[in-house]
Image (cartoon, rainbow, N blue to C red):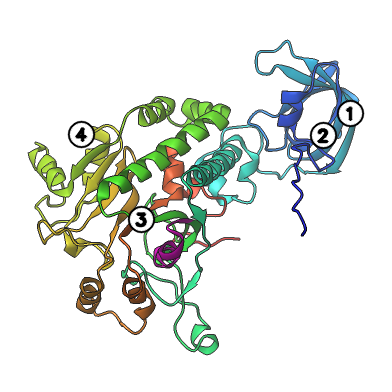
Amino acid sequence: MHRLQKTFYSTKSILPNRTIKSILENETSNSNVSITGWIRSVRKQKQLSFATVNDGSSLKGIQAILNNEDAQSLTTGACVKITGSLMDSPGKEQTKELQVESVKVLGECDSTYPLQKKRHSTEFLRSISHLRMRGNTGSAVLRVRNAAGEGFHQFFKEQEFILTNTPILTANDCEGGGEVFKVHTSEEFFKKPVYLTVSGQLHAETTASAMARVYTFGPTFRAEESLTSRHLAEFWMLEAEAAFIDRLDPLLDLAEASVQDTTRYVMKRCEEDLQFFNQWVDKSLLEKLQKSVDQPFVRMSYTEAIEVLQKRQHKFQFPTVWGSSLQSEHERYLASEYCQQPVFVTDYPAEQKPFYMRANEDDGKTVGCFDLLVPGIGELIGGSLREERYELLEQKMKDAKMDLNEYQWYLDLRKYGSAPHGGYGIGFERFMLWLTGLDNVREVIPMPRWFGHCKY
């Protein structure tokens, strides 16, 4: 009988070049090191020159001190390898700097390079998305985005969820809104219409019916002709499904903990980047994030929310009668002004929500669902208990005039060992707005796609 041998993996870098962040954190003064990266700026003086080099591993990179002759070959944007001695820095902006011994230009950069050393508008940076991550804002966004993904994965691992990969090509529309992208050749290839997924929820439910606790994290697509700062045609969703939940409160607890734990993780891992956003984007960012992890989120029902909105002296543009949809102006007021912190709104009218949400038994008018509204953004999370009762789900699908044959697989989950369950989805780009203080989802995804725009 063969025994599996335990293997312990070293965290030592396998690649020959080390990151600037690793060098600054682990090397002592007078160490001889080599760095690779891109020139952010070159400042030439009478006897010495100063170059800022960054490889994306940290916000500030490293300052290199070199003679004017070596500096002649350096231009902003050039890719370089620099060798020298790591020294303590007398300056306030950095603790260490590099005394250069040799410079090798790996890739030249001419004067047409658009990211010269000056402030650029987000609109301009968006027009050069293939280069904007070389700037402070773009690179900080990617580091925070990476840490947020790590934080969610760590949270769900600790909660004993498994990651499942739901399909991008799908034969159904989860939300039932019809705002889907149809694959052009699908009827010839698949012999039926096929679409890009709008949500991995229904497929995650199939996995949860066997594995109990699952989550998926991937791209989703909505063919919404929207130009607002909160909508993209392609965006990322984190969706979790958990079996054996028959009340809304445990689901709210899970959603709240996932946001708070991931926020804490990002605050710890990306302290320098968040300080940058706090200084240049939103001066209340760090205070807002700290408050959100220190205090429990507010919880109110849809009915209570309508009562709050009706009591406001200044009237809204859209109606605030029971049964009406909460619009952006209502969500902003509840989260930003009335609660001044994240707030769960629960138990919406059944007519507003998709077919799969579980009907509340006590009133016959609402479903066991929730939206998490956060200040400055509005809806961040949507979730619900799922209807696990076969006959009720089947009737709701009939009422929605859905093709039962097309969704028989979904009904089968209620036919063969149905379990009470629930789940939710987090719009990852909206979560990134929350973490960075930026005000447009197009700034927090590397290559944004929206109505009328699909560059690259």
Res 74 label: 2
How far apart are the two marked residues, 2 and 4, measured between alpha carbons? 54 Å
Name above or below for residue 51 compared with residue 190.
above
Callout 2–callout 1 Cβ contact below 8 Å? yes
**How far from the left and from the top, in percent, is residue 449?**
50, 59
361 with respect to 421 (left or right): left
Query: Label 2 sits on what residue type?
Result: Leu
Q: SS class of the residue under badge 4?
A: helix
Q: Nearer the viewer, mark 4 or mark 1?
A: 4
Query: Label 3 sits on what residue type?
Result: Gly
Res 70 label: 1
Q: Nearer the viewer, mark 1 or mark 3?
A: 3
The residue that label 3 is drawn on is 423
Range of residues picked out in magenta = 201-215
Q: Nearer the viewer, mark 2 or mark 4?
A: 4
Callout 3–callout 2 Cβ contact below 8 Å? no
**Residue 192 or 326: which is nearer the viewer?**
192
Residue neighbourhood size for the residue with mark 4, other residues' Cα within 10 Å, grouped as few (<14), some (14–19), many (≥20)? some
Secondary structure, magenta segment, majority class: helix
N-terminal label among 4 and 1: 1
Residue neighbourhood size for the residue with mark 2, other residues' Cα within 10 Å, grouped as few (<14), some (14–19), many (≥20)? many
Name above or below for residue 202 compared with residue 279.
below
**Residue 338 or 15: which is nearer the viewer?**
15
Callout 2–callout 4 Cβ contact below 8 Å? no
The residue that label 4 is drawn on is 338
How far apart are the two marked residues, 2 and 1, measured between alpha carbons? 8 Å
256 with respect to 449 (left or right): left
**How far from the left and from the top, in percent, is residue 429?**
46, 48
Query: Label 4 sits on what residue type?
Result: Tyr
**How far from the left and from the top, in percent, is residue 381?**
35, 49
